[in-house]
Image (cartoon, rainbow, N blue to C red):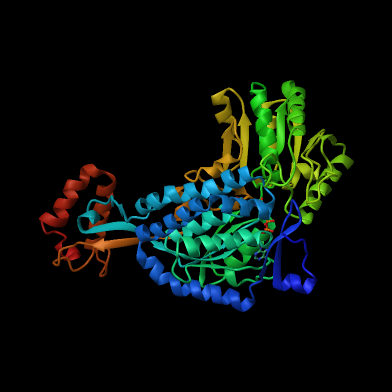
């Protein structure tokens, strides 16, 4: 592996040079897509759409199972590629990326066939249902743009791609340039493993600042964006011009509430893992801990001791617990927040600086106390290895502090009392609230992943997440006998039409009057002219 940065700003605009942020070694280079490449990708996706949609879900699922088997056959290679491109530990590259994707395909290759079957819609009106029926048919949307971030470059990109393809859409996919090498691996999985028809999946290599708006405008029919709230808002505005629906999976500032009856050994281990896994670069990482005053000191001691034991280094080394940050920019964000907190009175319990002995973009796992909501570290997304801990006096205060955020992605409550846990969980404004665990439910593809407030809109994963990729079209079918030439509500209007509709309104509400209405309408011929 060589070590080199792009030679010039000019080169940075035309080529992506990927480095391993743990070692600074160059692990891959590739050309940036040109604006013409972007247009070509969208055209190719549009052209491939009809054939792919017509295949049907069962046949499409077979392609995805081939992609899955390719991943399984190349598991070490895929995991190593993810670890090298991000610096994250191999265990995390496996369990939070590869395993999630394999499970998602395994579950939904079967489940999608059932979920996307035509869905009969029972009609309730007793007269209408004698001659009509309704059903929902799940139509694919067309071209879907999947734009993904660098922190989980494999699982986040794949979850959008897999559901979009299963549902019959074609995809234009743009990974973050920080992780373009993982993007290329995804492309390889679908070309060599799944052997998708040409144009069904099209990858763009482009920086966010240069990709333009084409991937958020027609003919694109849906946008799945995972990334920062700021960029999400901008994309939402572009999409709104054409009413293009979006799934927005955005930032978080996730709280953890530790009640006075919590198992402190477990809660402190959960806090350390929840804050420092993936070097804290997790949308749903523990970014704020609120601990009952009576157990606060003991909790901080345990967290400090466990944090000090974490081993930092290159994720390729199996003896490492925490890798580097992705970039110098992200490291700068974290340093800035920690400095702001210290200036406003926070105490650094451990960490708070870059380790001296390591070369890459490392920052020590950092625990802060004496924090408050005036500090950036308690308000802004940190997205790095920082764990601020704050005491609370009463449950209501804990809930109020947890909800004091523009974000609402995930949260957790730690207690031995199940009913207390559930009653607090219901009051927290977050897409997912876990009890005695944190963040990991992204690894359960059957559960929904979603944000409230500025953490996003729409759903990823789960049955509802699959339905984001289809249009539930309503088909209303006619079975009326040929003798029925008109409908009750058609022209011409008359006193007689008014009378029968009045009687119908009454009979459909007070069903005891239904027989009299049916007799009048159909048997005694009184309203024959209105119906036939
Ligand atoms: P980002 O918003 O900077 O970039 C995300 C993606 O959007 C990248 O592919 C980037 O190249 C692209 N992009 C950026 N600006 C663009 C533009 N103007 N036009 C088109 N594309 C553009 O986010 P990031 O730094 O890559 O990721 C970190 C953020 O993602 C954090 O805020 C994190 O919370 C969030 N995130 C959310 C979830 C979730 O599920 N809610 C999951 C992971 C990450």
Count of numbered tags: 0
Q: Is residue 147 depicted above or below 506 in this figure?
A: below
Q: Position of residue 141 (x, y in %)?
A: 45, 65
Rendering quadrant holding ligand 1: bottom right
Quadrant holding the N terminus: bottom right
Q: Is residue 27 depicted above or below 9 in this figure?
A: above
**Residue at horizontal 73%, vertical 30%?**
306
Tell me: 447 left or right of 56.
Answer: right
* Quarter where residue 65 is shown: bottom left
Q: Which of 410 and 171 is in front in this view?
A: 171
Q: Is residue 498 depicted above or below 507 in this figure?
A: below
Task: Spot the residue most to the bottom.
Answer: 36
Task: Spot the residue most to the front.
Answer: 1
Tell me: 180 left or right of 467.
Answer: right
Q: Where is residue 393 in the image (x, y as percent from the top left)?
A: 73, 25
Q: Where is residue 295 in the image (x, y as percent from the top left)?
A: 72, 22
Quadrant holding the C terminus: bottom left
**Residue at horizontal 67%, vertical 24%?**
264
**Residue at horizontal 13%, vertical 66%?**
483
On the question of residue 403 being in view, the answer is: no
On the question of residue 433 being in view, the answer is: yes
Q: Position of residue 85 (x, y in %)?
A: 67, 55
Q: Nearer the viewer, residue 82 or 458?
A: 82
**Residue at horizontal 24%, vertical 44%?**
511
Q: Nearer the viewer, residue 467 or 500?
A: 467
Task: Spot the residue most to the right.
Answer: 343
């Amino acid at each position: 592996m060589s070590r080199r940065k792009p030679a010039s700003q000019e080169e940075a605009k035309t080529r992506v040079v990927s480095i391993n942020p743990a070692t600074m070694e160059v692990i891959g280079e590739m050309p940036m897509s040109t604006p013409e490449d972007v247009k070509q990708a969208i055209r190719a996706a549009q052209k491939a759409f009809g054939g792919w949609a017509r295949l049907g879900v069962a046949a499409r699922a077979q392609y995805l199972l081939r992609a899955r088997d390719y991943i399984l056959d190349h598991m070490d290679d895929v995991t190593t590629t993810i670890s090298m491109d991000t610096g994250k530990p191999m265990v995390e590259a496996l369990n939070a990326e590869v395993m999630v994707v394999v499970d998602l395909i395994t579950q939904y290759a079967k489940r999608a066939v059932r979920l996307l079957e035509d869905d009969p819609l029972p009609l309730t009106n007793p007269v209408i249902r004698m001659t009509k029926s309704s059903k929902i048919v799940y139509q694919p949307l067309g071209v879907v743009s999947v734009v993904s971030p660098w922190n989980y470059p494999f699982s986040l990109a794949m979850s959008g791609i897999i559901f979009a393809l299963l549902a019959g859409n074609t995809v234009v996919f743009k990974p973050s340039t920080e992780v373009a090498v993982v993007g290329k691996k995804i492309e390889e999985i679908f070309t060599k493993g799944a052997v998708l028809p040409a144009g069904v999946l099209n990858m763009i290599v482009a920086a966010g600042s240069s990709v333009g708006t084409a991937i958020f405008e027609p003919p694109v029919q849906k946008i799945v964006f995972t990334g920062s709230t700021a960029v999400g808002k901008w994309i939402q505005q572009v999409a709104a011009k054409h009413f293009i629906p979006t799934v927005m999976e955005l930032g978080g500032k996730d709280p953890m509430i530790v009640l006075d009856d919590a198992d402190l050994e477990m809660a402190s281990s959960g806090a350390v893992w929840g804050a420092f896994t993936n070097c804290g670069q997790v949308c749903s990482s523990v970014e704020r801990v609120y601990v009952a005053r009576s157990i606060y000191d003991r909790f901080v001691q345990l967290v400090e001791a466990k944090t000090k034991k974490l081993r930092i280094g290159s994720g390729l080394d199996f003896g490492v617990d925490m890798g580097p940050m992705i970039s110098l920019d992200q490291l700068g964000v974290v340093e800035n927040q920690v400095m702001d907190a210290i200036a406003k009175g926070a105490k650094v319990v451990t960490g708070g600086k870059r380790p001296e002995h390591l070369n890459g973009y490392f920052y020590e796992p950092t625990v802060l106390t004496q924090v408050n909501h005036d500090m950036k570290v308690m308000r802004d997304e940190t997205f790095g290895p920082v764990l601020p801990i704050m005491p609370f006096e009463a449950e209501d205060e804990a809930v109020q502090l947890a909800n004091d955020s523009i974000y609402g992605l995930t949260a957790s409550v730690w207690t031995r009392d199940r009913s207390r846990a559930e009653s607090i969980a219901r009051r927290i404004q977050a897409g997912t609230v876990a009890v005695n665990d944190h963040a990991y439910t992204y690894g359960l593809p059957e559960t929904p992943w979603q944000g409230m407030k500025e953490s996003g809109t729409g759903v990823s994963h789960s049955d509802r997440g699959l339905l984001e990729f289809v249009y539930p079209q309503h088909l209303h079918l006619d079975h009326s006998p040929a003798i029925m030439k008109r409908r009750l509500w058609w022209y011409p209007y008359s006193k007689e039409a008014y009378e029968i509709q009045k009687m119908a309104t009454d009979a459909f509400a007070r069903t005891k009057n239904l027989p009299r209405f049916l007799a009048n309408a159909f048997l005694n011929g009184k309203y024959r002219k209105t119906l036939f």
